[in-house]
Image (tube, rainbow, N blue to C red):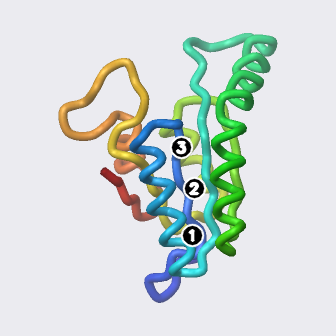
Amino acid sequence: MGNRQNGRFHNILVGYDGSQEAEKAVEVGLAMASTLDSKIKVLAVAQPSEPPTAVELQAVVDDAREHYDNALRRIANSARENGIRIETAIAVGHPAEQIIRQAEQGHVDLIIVGRRGISTFAKIIIGSVSERVLRYAPCPVLVTR
């Protein structure tokens, strides 16, 4: 778990997929990080369609970097201009699993995810990634709308 003391969220992790819901999650995360003087990490996850070979995996990583690079740079620049300590990263795998892994390894105190992300089908109440993060996260989770 994170090093949350006295209800403080020192390390915030935001899951990002480029969707409108993810943009809202980033907005909320940046506002909280600014108000609480917290560090924030924005994590984009590229999900391969099936278990890839090493060459295919590198192609997925390269495509993800190309896809997310401008958005993550825009987010980071905006945060830094407002004095917010920020890190951005791109991971490959199942989004919920990668978010949970990053939360565990990074001693995250709060995870913020959008209610629904970009997917081929919609859940009735909550997206499958946010639902899985809620179920298995090692810390509090805030789901934005």
Left/right placement of residue 58 relative to residue 104 reads right
Q: Residue 89: x and y, percent?
A: 70, 46
Q: What element carries label 2?
A: helix
- In contact (CB < 8 Å): disc 1 and disc 2: yes
Look at mark 2 in the image and give the residue it sits on: 103
Q: What element carries label 3?
A: strand
Picture coordinates of residue 48, whole percent (x, y): 60, 19
Q: Where is residue 143 in the image (x, y as percent from the top left)?
A: 35, 54
Amino acid type, callout 1: Gly
Q: Could you say which quadrant of the image residue 45 lies in?
A: top right
Measured along the vertical axis of the image, is residue 104 above or below residue 129?
Answer: below
Query: Three-letter amino acid code at disc 2?
Result: Ala
Q: In this view, does 21 lie above or below 47?
A: below
Alpha-carbon span between mark 1 and mark 2? 8 Å
Q: Name the residue under label 1.
A: 2
Q: Does label 3 or label 1 sit earlier along the sequence?
A: 1
Q: In this view, does 124 lie above or below 72?
A: above
- Image quarter where the N terminus lies is bottom right
As rendered, which of 66 and 61 lies closer to the eye?
A: 66
Pointers 3 and 1 in contact (CB under 8 A)? no
- Residue furthest out toward the left: 124
Dot 1 or dot 2, earlier in sequence: 1
Q: Which residue sits at x=53%, y=53%?
A: 14
Residue that badge 3 annotates: 16
User: Does residue 133 show up?
Assistant: yes
When asked about the image quadrant of residue 20, the answer is top left
In this picture, residue 1 sits left or right of residue 90: left
In the image, is 17 to the left or to the right of 58?
Answer: left
Which label number is shown at residue 108?
Answer: none
First of labels 3, 2 by sequence position: 3
- Of residues 132 and 59, the one nearer the viewer is 59
